[in-house]
């Protein structure tokens, strides 16, 4: 397997992170990784085929949002929470707060 490029913390750029988070599938992946636990890529179900997900993982990795760790034929993903919080304080909190399951229902009068 080829060596995977992960930008150093100081190389993570906001415009690239926002681009990565701007796609619904990539945003769902980030939300699935929000616990901070390393997760086997096959355990993430965002309703897209694996062939599609590999491209999304690449965008997330190259933007600095996730870290990928190959182990044999498996690939493990981790949200780079500490790096993102250091570079862009509060961004991940906003991303998680915007999740529909966290949204409060609209009030009716």
Image (cartoon, rainbow, N blue to C red):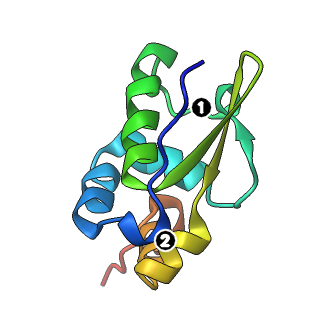
Drawn side of residue 39 relative to residue 2, left or right: right
The local secondary structure at tag 2 comes to helix
Taking depth in this image into account, of 3 and 62 the one nearest to the observer is 3
User: Would residue 103 be visible to someone looking at this image?
Assistant: no
Measured as percent of width and height from the top left, residue 2 is found at 54, 22
Drawn side of residue 79 relative to residue 104, left or right: right
Measured as percent of width and height from the top left, residue 8 is found at 48, 62
Measured as percent of width and height from the top left, residue 71 is found at 76, 27
Quarter of the figure with the C terminus: bottom left
Quarter of the figure with the N terminus: top right
- Residue ID for mark 2: 84
Tell me the residue at 46%/83% (across/down). Answer: 90
**Which numbered mark, 1 or 2, is in the foreground of this view?**
2
The local secondary structure at tag 1 comes to loop
Taking depth in this image into account, of 107 and 86 the one nearest to the observer is 86
User: Would residue 54 be visible to someone looking at this image?
Assistant: yes
Measured as percent of width and height from the top left, residue 35 is found at 70, 61
Q: What is the CA distance from the residue labelled 1 to the residue labelled 2? A: 23 Å
Please say if the residues under marks 1 and 2 sit with CB atoms less than 8 Å apart: no
Please determine whether, in this image, residue 37 is positioned above or below residue 89: above
Tell me the residue at 24%/53% (across/down). Answer: 19
Drawn side of residue 52 relative to residue 35, left or right: left
* Residue neighbourhood size for the residue with mark 2, other residues' Cα within 10 Å, grouped as few (<14), some (14–19), many (≥20): many
* Residue neighbourhood size for the residue with mark 1, other residues' Cα within 10 Å, grouped as few (<14), some (14–19), many (≥20): few
Tell me the residue at 46%/24% (across/down). Answer: 54
Q: In which quadrant of the rendered view does residue 69 lie?
A: top right
Taking depth in this image into account, of 92 and 13 the one nearest to the observer is 13
Please determine whether, in this image, residue 43 is positioned above or below residue 20: above
- Residue ID for mark 1: 45
Q: In which quadrant of the rendered view does residue 39 lie?
A: top right
């Amino acid at each position: 397997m080829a060596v995977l490029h992960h930008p150093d913390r100081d190389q993570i750029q906001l415009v690239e992170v926002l681009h990565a988070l701007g796609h619904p599938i990539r945003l769902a992946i980030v939300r699935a990784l929000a616990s901070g636990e390393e997760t086997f890529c096959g355990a993430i179900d965002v309703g897209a085929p694996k062939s599609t997900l590999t491209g999304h993982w690449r965008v997330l990795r190259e933007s600095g949002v996730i870290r990928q760790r190959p182990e044999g034929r498996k690939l493990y993903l981790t949200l780079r929470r500490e790096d993102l919080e250091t570079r862009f304080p509060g961004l991940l909190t906003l991303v998680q707060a915007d999740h529909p399951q966290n949204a409060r229902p609209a009030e009716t009068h």
